[in-house]
Image (cartoon, rainbow, N blue to C red):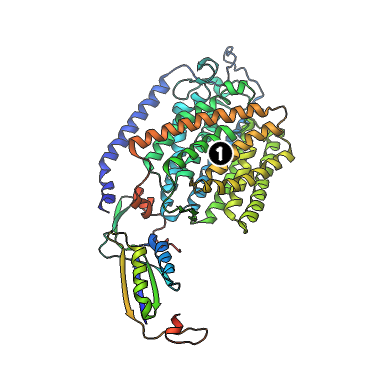
């Protein structure tokens, strides 16, 4: 079992969701984050004072998958999120030790679904 | 991203420009005051005999009339706050500063250009028609002699009240356009277009009716501006929305994606401010404090607004399965726009009918215009153009002694003039500086792109889908 964490551009979320659904990955957790990588920030001004904004709005998608779904999920995320420009985002894959469905108590692969 | 920062480096040039503009306007004002004879009086007064003005009503009645007209001016003025909050609330947070900026500058620019050109273009006065009764101009600037301050000028208001009241209307026509092109039009392109449109087109076509031009001679009736204000703004809004194109991601293959407003409470505040303002918009268009006429007009106005809300609610509930708040708010505005042409000449039941039909029309129009893939974020075209035309034609149906054919003629004449001039002006602006912001800026938000600031820096205005 793996936990796939993807950080993507917010306006690519609809495309990534569509690609994931096409790959039959329906379960995910989405959160709003701010962050930066290679993408530089931008300037804002307010009544004469200038500030640098370099933590940019991003969207984080967390998906728990069974081994067979790891590659299709990665491919789907890349397909939906890639634009070729700096700022497209990153995908992190971590080992998932356990997964439990709260309603039934199922564990492991069946709990991921 | 560096390019956005360099926008700020033109600071010293901006200061020089501001100083030049200030110097230029100061000189223009001095030249105005130096001119001795009054020009552009809307009503020819009897020559004053031995210093006594030829008063047409008692001083007390004149004071009451003028006071009401001034209050009406304030009410129409506050409509700009209504427009600002409606438009900003119905759009995304990342564009709020830009929308508010446009809605702040439009009344300012509108009043200034009305003083310089608009008032005398709209009301040339009998001696200043140039091209038949199709185009006239009473001269630059506003000035009046002593008769302009008395009922010799008009039984209902002084020259200055006349100017300011009408000036408030001018800016409302321009601000209608901003709702249809927001979230993707360049700020300077919009400001240039609006300045030209409100300075030249609005007063010129307005002279055809209120300036006693050719349409007035034919018996066309537009009490407070369903055509002259709302459809004039509405046609330009339609042309603008088409020429600037839809927002990114609004229309997909065969589908419409909703782009939701970020603050519905503000939209409600705005609509009720607009309704409040309409008491002055219609009530003041009586052009006096005549108790019977004003009180009647306020009733037809309010009943049409209420019926508009009801019509929109029923239509929205049936078509969309669940009642949509933004639709009923648009319905109130639709009813108000619809009654604006004939609030003084239709009966109370007719005003309810006009409002009800306007409410139905606005919902169907919002849905229909999206089907045509014309992106109108706030429904400006549906509220102001569609219901403005409806209200004008309704006068021909229910107005005592009014002709449907003449109303239709008026609608057609304004359609032709406004569509053509808006297309020409937008085309000119597009040639000079482009109309639309870049894709990156549209995604990042015009607040950061055009203004380098955010409306809600402490809140994280995030997407939820």
In x, y percent, where is residue B380? 53, 43
Q: Quadrant of residue B150?
A: top right
Number of labels in the image equals 1
In x, y percent, where is residue A15? 40, 62
Image point (47%, 30%), residue name: B420
Does residue B356 sit above or below A62 in this rendering?
above
Which residue is identified by label 1? B385
Residue B260 falls left or right of residue A54: right
Q: Is residue B431 visible?
A: yes
Please identify the quadrant where the N terminus of chain B is shown: bottom left
Asked which secondary structure carries label 1, the reply is helix
Image point (43%, 67%), residue name: A22
Residue A68 or A38: which is nearer the viewer? Answer: A68
Q: Quadrant of residue B283?
A: top right
Please identify the quadrant where the C terminus of chain B is shown: bottom left
Image point (65%, 38%), residue name: B339
**Chain holding disc 1:** B
Residue A61 falls left or right of residue A43: right
In x, y percent, where is residue B432? 33, 35
Q: Is residue B151 visible?
A: no
Does residue B188 sit above or below B265 in this rendering?
above
Q: Quadrant of residue B356?
A: top right
Residue B76 or A85: which is nearer the viewer? Answer: A85
Residue B195 or B297: which is nearer the viewer? Answer: B195
Q: Few, some or many C-alpha atoms within 10 Å of disc 1 (few <14, some 14-19, many ≥20)?
A: many
């Amino acid at each position: 079992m793996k936990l796939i964490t993807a950080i993507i551009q917010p306006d690519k979320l609809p495309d990534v969701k569509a690609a994931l659904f096409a790959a039959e990955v329906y379960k995910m957790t989405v959160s709003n984050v701010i962050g930066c990588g290679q993408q530089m920030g931008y300037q804002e001004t307010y009544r004469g004072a200038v500030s640098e904004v370099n933590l940019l709005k991003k969207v984080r998608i967390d998906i728990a998958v069974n081994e067979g779904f790891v590659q299709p999920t990665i491919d789907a995320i890349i397909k939906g999120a890639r634009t070729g420009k700096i700022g497209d985002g990153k995908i992190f894959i971590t080992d998932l030790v356990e997964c439990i469905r709260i309603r039934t108590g199922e564990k492991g692969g069946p709990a991921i679904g | 991203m560096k390019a956005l920062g360099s926008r700020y480096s033109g600071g010293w040039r901006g200061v020089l420009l501001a100083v030049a503009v200030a110097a230029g306007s100061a000189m223009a004002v001095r030249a105005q005051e130096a001119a001795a004879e009054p020009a552009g009086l809307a009503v020819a007064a009897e020559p004053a005999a031995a210093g006594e003005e030829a008063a047409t009503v008692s001083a007390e009645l004149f004071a009451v009339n003028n006071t009401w007209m001034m209050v009406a001016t304030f009410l129409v003025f506050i409509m700009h706050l209504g427009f600002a909050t409606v438009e900003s609330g119905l759009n995304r947070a990342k564009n709020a500063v830009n929308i508010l900026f446009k809605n702040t500058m439009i009344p300012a620019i509108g009043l200034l250009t009305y003083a310089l050109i608009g008032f005398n273009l709209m009301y040339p006065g009998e001696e200043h028609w140039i091209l038949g009764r199709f185009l006239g101009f009473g001269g630059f600037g506003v000035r009046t002699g002593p008769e302009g301050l008395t009922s010799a000028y008009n039984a209902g208001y002084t020259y200055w009240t006349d100017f300011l009241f009408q000036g408030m209307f001018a800016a409302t026509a321009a601000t209608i356009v901003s709702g249809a092109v927001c979230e993707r039009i360049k700020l300077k392109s919009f400001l240039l277009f609006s300045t030209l449109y409100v300075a030249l087109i609005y007063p010129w076509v307005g002279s055809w009716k209120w300036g006693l031009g050719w349409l007035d001679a034919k018996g066309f009736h537009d009490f407070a501006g369903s055509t002259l204000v709302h459809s004039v703004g509405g046609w330009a809004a339609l042309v603008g929305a088409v020429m600037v194109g839809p927002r990114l991601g609004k229309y997909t293959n065969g589908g419409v994606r909703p782009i939701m407003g970020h603050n519905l409470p503000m939209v409600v505040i705005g609509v009720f401010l607009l309704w409040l303002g309409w008491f002055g918009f219609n009530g003041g268009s009586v052009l006096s404090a005549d108790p019977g006429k004003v009180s009647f007009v306020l009733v037809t106005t309010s009943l049409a607004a209420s019926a508009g809300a009801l019509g929109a609610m029923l239509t929205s509930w049936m078509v969309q399965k669940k009642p949509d708040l933004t639709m009923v708010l648009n319905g109130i505005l639709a009813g108000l726009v619809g009654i604006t042409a004939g609030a003084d000449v239709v009966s109370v039941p007719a005003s309810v009918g006009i409002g009800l039909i306007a409410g139905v029309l606005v919902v169907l129009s919002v849905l229909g215009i999206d089907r045509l893939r014309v992106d109108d974020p706030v429904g400006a075209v549906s509220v102001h153009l569609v219901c403005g035309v409806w209200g004008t034609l309704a006068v021909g149906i229910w107005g005592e002694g009014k002709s449907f054919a003449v109303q239709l003629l008026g609608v057609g004449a304004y359609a032709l003039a406004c569509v053509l001039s808006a297309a020409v002006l937008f085309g000119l602006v597009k040639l000079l500086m482009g109309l639309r912001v870049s894709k990156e800026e549209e995604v990042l938000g015009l607040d950061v792109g055009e203004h380098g600031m955010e409306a809600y820096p402490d809140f994280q205005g995030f997407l939820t889908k």
